[in-house]
Image: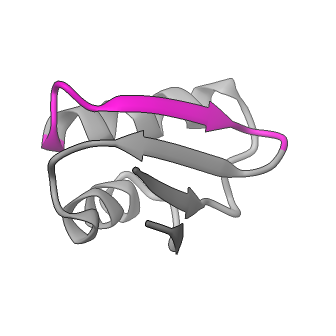
Amino acid sequence: MYQFNVPNMTCGHCAGTVQRAIKQVDGQAEIKVDVARKLVEVRSSAPEQSIGTAIREAGYENSLIAR
């Protein structure tokens, strides 16, 4: 499982955009989003770099905080 800090994620729309971006990388990914904490948890077999890149390409800066 990966945990990403996504500091510019501020609302439900943002959360949905991030989730869709991750699903494009791994359609089977399990995703939990906590907008208040600006945290995205992802259980996926895809490399964390691919997930981070997808989130960035969707318009959201992010950093991996746990693996």
Q: Quadrant of the C terminus?
A: bottom left
Query: x, y percentage for residue 9?
Result: 66, 49
**Boundaries of the magenta span:** 25-36
Residue at (25, 71) in percent of width and height:
49
Above/below status of 7 relative to 34: below
Does residue 33 appear to the left or right of 34 in the view shown? left
List x then y, in percent, for residue 64.
Answer: 49, 72
In this figure, which colouring scheme has been used for the structure?
Answer: one colour
Q: Residue at x 81, y 49 (%)?
A: 37
Q: Tell me which residue sits at (30%, 41%) in the image.
A: 22
Is 59 situated left or right of 26 in this image?
A: right
Quadrant of residue 12 within the rendered picture: top right
Residue 31 falls within the magenta-colored stretch: yes
Give above or below for 41 relative to 55: above
Residue 31 coordinates in the image, percent (x, y): 44, 31
| Residue for point 28% across, 57% down | 51
Indicate the quadrant where residue 35 lies.
top right
Query: Disc count in the image?
Result: 0
Location of residue 66 in the rendering, given as x and y in whole percent from the top left corner: 53, 68
* Residue farthest along the right direction in this orientation: 36
In the image, residue 18 sits, relative to residue 57, either above or below, namely above
The residue closer to the viewer here, 14 or 28, is 28
